[in-house]
Image: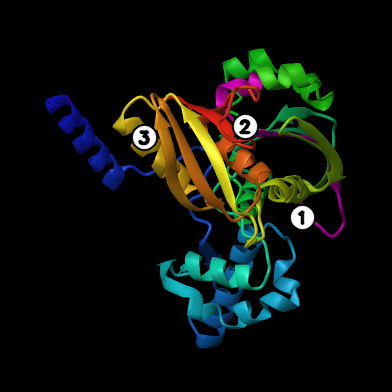
Amino acid sequence: MIHWMKSILAALCLMLTYQPATASEFSDLYEVRTEVSGRGAETLEQAFKDAMAIVLTRVTGIRAVDQAEETQALLVRARDYIQQFGYIDSRTLLISFDGQAINRRLSDLGLPVWGQERPATLVWLVLTDERGRREILAADDSGPVAESLKKTASQRGIPVVIPLMDAQDRRAIDVADLRGVFEDNIFAASERYDADAVLVGSARAQRRTDADGPFYRVSWTLLFAGQVQNWRGDLSEGIDRAADEFATVLAAIDSKNSGRQLVLVKGVGDLVAYGRVRLYLESLSLVNSVAVDRVHGDDVLFSLELRAGPDQLASAIKLGKVLFAEDSEYPVPTPGTIVYRYRR
């Protein structure tokens, strides 16, 4: 009896304090830092509008969503969706928007909503300067290339990782591996970073008469969800195109007909595990509600009401690294049930 009372108490405490989080979350989707030239009313209104445009791009996954007719009212009334704002310094404004209100409005407009589940993306980038010298971008690089990548990633809501390029990385991979996109070597070198996607770029500097510094032409390759995508563009096009690809998998238009999805989770051995699994499922932006259908031993059958399809749910769960897919041939109580195993 005492053991069960302790388990129940632990589970209740967990329900109150546990915050599901993974490396694949971008926690500030509705918060924007923007540079301003002053504090006048017109300057502020433009800053609010520009910040709202960034939020809409992050949340819908659509690059030019701020140009769409449906979103113009949101931009004009950006101030109405602000929860708070303030100056970090004399030129930097921090603006926080009401995410729930924005999501509801986007759903009403029939636009997709992409929640917190974001693929953590490792960027391997080879830089070739105008003299033909090559180097791999490293995490401690604070130059314009790194800043450009980070700025685009922030605008799209993508968590990016730039490799350390320490002794371990230098032993594991070299310029030839990346320029040739030798996948086995790239995946082996990337394993230490536990990323959900790998973005490989080979950039060549090209000086232009209208630019202070070199302009880079880049051949990009995205390795994500077992697929390989290739394209060419500038530095920002790498993150932008990757975000476009992620959005096709994870952004969802709220459908009233998505209905119920049964999810069988194995390995739920105690109330603490149950609390963690349930809170994790409830935290998924594609899930409207979670209920328990039945319990048998360490197996719990959850009934989820979704705002998207089961394929998108599976993609979001894969990013979380909390539940792991079991063999699809495992016997299930109802056809169409998705089976996972919980691992602490």
| Magenta residue span | 189-213
Residue 113 in view here: yes
Of residue 85 and residue 68, the one placed in the foreground of this image is 68
Residue 294 placement (x, y as % from top left) = 42, 37
Would you name the residue on which mark 1 appears?
Answer: 212
Does the stretch in magenta take in 281? no
Of residue 47 and residue 214, the one placed in the foreground of this image is 47
Q: Residue lying furthest top in this view?
A: 171
Of residue 160 and residue 39, the one placed in the foreground of this image is 160
> Distance of mark 2 from mark 3, alpha carbons?
41 Å
Helix, strand or loop status at disc 1:
loop
- Classify residue 61 by image quadrant: bottom right
Residue 137 placement (x, y as % from top left) = 67, 33
Q: Callout 1, which amino acid?
A: Asp
Does the stretch in magenta take in 203? yes
Split into 4 quadrants, where in the image is the N terminus? top left
**Residue at 55% across / 66% down in the picture?**
103
Which of discs 2 and 3 lies nearer the camera? The answer is 3
Would you name the residue on which mark 2 appears?
Answer: 138
**Residue at 74% across / 78% down in the picture?**
69
| Residue 285, numbered circle | none
| Residue 274, numbered circle | 3
Compared across the picture, whether 294 is left or right of 334 comes to left
Residue 20 in view here: no
Helix, strand or loop status at disc 2:
loop
Label 1: how many residues lie within 10 Å, few (<14), some (14-19) or many (20+)? few
**Residue at 64% across / 35% down in the picture?**
335
> Distance of mark 1 from mark 2, alpha carbons?
23 Å
